[in-house]
Amino acid sequence: MYGKPDSPKISAIGSQNVSISFAPPASADTSKLIIYLIKYRKAGETEWQSVPDTSSRSVTVNKLHSCTHYEITVAAKYQTGQFGPASDPLKVKTKCGKCLFKDGLH
């Protein structure tokens, strides 16, 4: 019943953030879409983090670690209160920035 959005596209990559954009699900009645849920996690981890729900189709995921691989997905929430399936994950690596600490940890 509810379509899956395409995988998000990268707009910009920083050392601690990734900006993405995405289209609504192809099969969705966009008049019934109310928000998008964007989730991300470090590659290989099982627990997802979320950014605040948004109605925008361009989002920046902040507070990431530099030089780290992440997966980002998008799901649409409808007026019924139900979420559609999440997109396939976008796989991205943040840029490698300067180390902030003497021991080399970021």
Image (tube, helix red, strand yellow):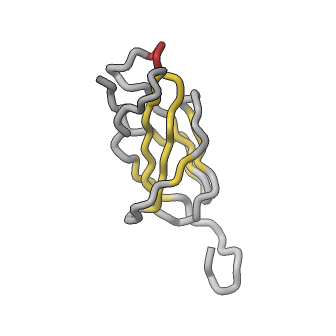
Residue furthest front as drawn? 80
Image coordinates of residue 72 in percent, x first then y, are 45, 48
**Left or right relative to 59: residue 84:** left
Q: Is residue 58 above or below residue 17?
A: above
Residue ID at (47%, 57%): 41
Image coordinates of residue 30 in percent, x first then y, are 45, 16
**Left or right relative to 61: residue 83:** left
Is 96 or 87 nearer to us in this picture?
87
Q: Quadrant of residue 45?
A: bottom left
Residue ID at (62%, 66%): 97
Residue furthest bottom as drawn? 103
Q: Is residue 18 above or below residue 36?
A: below
User: Where is the N terminus found, in terms of image quarters?
Assistant: top left
Residue ID at (70%, 74%): 100
Image coordinates of residue 24 in percent, x first then y, are 43, 25
Is 102 or 61 nearer to us in this picture?
61
Residue ID at (34%, 22%): 26
